Image (cartoon, rainbow, N blue to C red):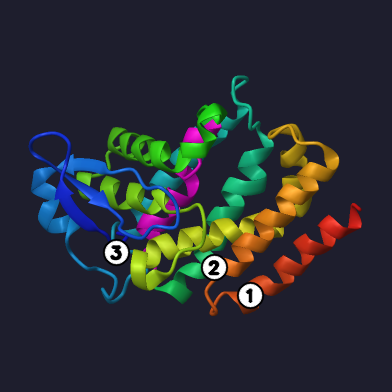
Amino acid sequence: MSEGYLSEGPNRGTVAIRFSDAPYPIMRLAFPSEMSDLLSMDISNTPDRTIRSYDGSLLDAILPILRNLVEAACRDPGSRIGSDFFREHVLVVEDFCRQLAPLFGADLGIVLPAAILHDISAIEDFSKVAEHHTLGAIRTADILRDHGFSEEQAVEVSACAQLHLVPVPSGTYGPEAACLSHADALSQMARPAYWLHYAGKVRGLGFDEGRGWYRSLVEDRWSRLTDSVKPVAKPLYRKAVDACEARQ
């Protein structure tokens, strides 16, 4: 779970996760008050975090269900994002999470469900894209509860998903949030053709405006990467920059 601090939630009998120095607005997520001991635990140094939340067979069983749910949402005629987003972003983020998890010591049982569901709110309603990280965290928790996840698991996965927008440091936000947020950034660098297409078709930007938007996104994400990830990311960064310059 990403490191934060607890306060009384807006409703009696709840507590809320808040982040004092998050790099973007974080909504206060309320959970049952009996979770307060769990939420205040520092688990960032827990040993053997390869898969702590589930045994491997359970994780293997649930991930295809979540993938099918998100892919169906992308294919829905009402989704502005469209079906390409699942292949070109969601699955790419999941793959990078698997690659980065050993580097951060992240728990795949938390990171992989979060990777699949992290953009669910924007997929279902693109008009809420500016706040999709917070709305998506709530939606993620609801989906996981509906599919038999415990409250502990739903809380940890949704907290991770909420922090995906820009790369965040493991020491502050926990290894799972760092893994997912870095994987999200790498996915945006690794698929320049798709993101230039996304700028025009999904965001409705003109040719030059879309290229500028993507170049700014790439530069911002590159600047936030941890030093340990930059050697891996550098070829992807150059690929993205070259794609922008080639379209001039």
Residue at position x 61%, y 53% in the image: 92
Q: Left of 149 or right of it: where is 40?
A: left
In this view, the residue in front, 147 or 10, is 10
Residue 151 position, x and y percent, is: 21, 44
Magenta span contains residue 26: no
Magenta span contains residue 116: yes
Q: Is residue 194 above or below residue 123?
A: below
Q: Which of the two discs, 1 and 3, labels the residue nearer the N terminus?
A: 3
Q: Which mark is residue 232?
A: 1
Residue at position x 24%, y 68% in the image: 43
Compute the Cα span from label 2 to label 3: 17 Å
Disc 3 target residue: 52
Disc 2 target residue: 99
Compute the Cα span from label 2 to label 1: 10 Å
> How dense is the environment of label 2, judged by Cα within 10 Å: few (below 14), some, or many (20 and up)?
few
Mark 1 element type: helix
The amino acid sitting under disc 3 is: Arg
Mark 1 or 3, closer to the camera: 1
User: Marks 2 and 1: CB-CB under 8 Å?
Assistant: yes
Mark 2 element type: helix
The amino acid sitting under disc 2 is: Gln
In the rendered image, which quarter is residue 13 located in? top left
In the rendered image, which quarter is residue 21 located in? bottom left
> How dense is the environment of label 1, judged by Cα within 10 Å: few (below 14), some, or many (20 and up)?
few
Q: Let me know if residue 138 appears in the view.
A: yes
Give the residues in magenta: 106-123
Compute the Cα span from label 1 to label 3: 26 Å
